[in-house]
Each structure stands twice: as structure tokens, then as C-alpha cells.
Amino acid sequence: MMIEIRKKSFNAYAEIKYYLDSLNIAGEYGATSNFVGSMRNFNKDKKVTHMTLEYYPGMTEKYLETIAKESIDKWMLLDVLILHRIGKINVGEDIVLVATWSAHRKDAFESCRAIMEQLKSGAPFWKKEETSAGAIWVEKNTPGY
Amino acid sequence: MQVSVKYFAGIRELIGESNSTINVQEGTSVSSLWRSIIETKNVKFDNVKMAVNMEYVKSEHQLKAGDEVAFFPSVTGG
């Protein structure tokens, strides 16, 4: 399991490969599921140029570790990776990556979705977008279900 | 007794500081502390989230000496 908060930009698909190669679980997993959230250039009717992501050092990592561990207990998972950006993020850059590995697709699909929804609803991150109407704190996330 | 208080995002900007140390009475609830802070600062904020020692708590949660209390808006990560 790996949880990381990162200031520098990353390529989610390169991160998946890099982490998977480090696991040495080839042959044990039959399913990989992942979610990648990336920076849009719009929010509703406003153009967005970039944003700043703030977090609560300590609590954010603790929260993410808890939801990852709970998922490992609930589903038959071989591993979980959660990577999340902070700081200044430009349009097109990846913001979040969740990946799960299991023997069969049901566990990988369901756990990846559940981790992502719990992250969106409870992980202490806050987005401030720079828009055509000025800098605006995003007030709430769109519902996932 | 003393507790340390942290503010994040829009609430930090509203309060005008990122952290402070506040004297409270034994058994003070986290919501009472929040009410006293916003009354002192003369500000309003709906739907504040509260955490103590890096865990979400309910508004009636009672504070202990040395607690780290955090107030922040709805989260918007991912």
C-alpha cells in the first residue's frame, strides 16, 4: 500500500507502472482498476486557468491510510496506491490517482470506486480555482453516485 | 486549559490567521469554541467541519487540554 501527497506534477499512468513494477506480484493479480482525476479548464460557465490545492498535513495522510486499509479489509485486494497533488496545479495536469489490484475484477472495480468516493467526501483537501471571475474556493464536490 | 486551533482554506482567510492557541474551560465543546471564535472575529460561516487531533468529531465533542482542533470548509479534493 502506498499513500503519497505530492507537490510536483506526475503522470498517473507512469506512476501505476512504476509502483506495480516495485510490487513483484506478477501472476498473483488478474485485475487492475484505476481512477485518474485531472485539471479541467472550466467549472460550470467559468474558464479556469489554474488552481491551488491545500491540505491538512497529518490528517490528510491519516484519512487516506484509513480508507485504504478499510478497503483492503473489505475486498480481496493485493495492493492499493493513492497519489494526490497539492500546491499549484495547471490545466491538464493529473490531480489524483487511485489504483487497486486484485485477483478478480469485482474487488478491483468496487474498491477503487469506494476509495475515490470516500476521498472526495472526506479527505481534507481544498481547491481554490483561478477563474475568469477571479480566485474562487470550490464550495463542494459534484456527487459521484 | 489550552488547545491549539488550526484553520484551513476559506475559513483561514475569513479568520485572518492559520493557527492560534486558545484558553478554554475543561469540558468545552468544539462547537462552543467555534461560536466564541466567530463571535470574537465578528464573522459568519455556514457548514463548518470540525476535527480534533486529526479525526472528524461531532459538534458536541468535549475538548481536553492540549487538543489540536481544526476548523475547515467542506472538502473539495480529488
Image: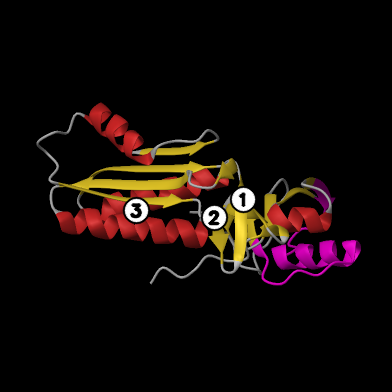
Q: Which of A107/A6 is in front?
A: A6
**Secondary element at image label 3:** helix
Q: Is residue B48 magenta?
A: yes
- Parent chain of label 2: A
Q: Which of A107/A86 is in front?
A: A86
The residue carrying mark 1 is A49
Q: Quadrant of residue A20?
A: top left
Tell me which segment is drawn in magenta.
B20-49
Image position, residue A14 (x, y; %)? 33, 34
Q: Marks 3 and 2: same chain?
A: yes
The residue carrying mark 3 is A70
The residue carrying mark 2 is A41
- Parent chain of label 3: A
The 10 Å Cα crowd at callout 3, few under 14, some 14 to 19, many 20 or more, is few
Q: Tag 1: residue type?
A: Thr
Q: Which of A86/A134 is in front?
A: A134
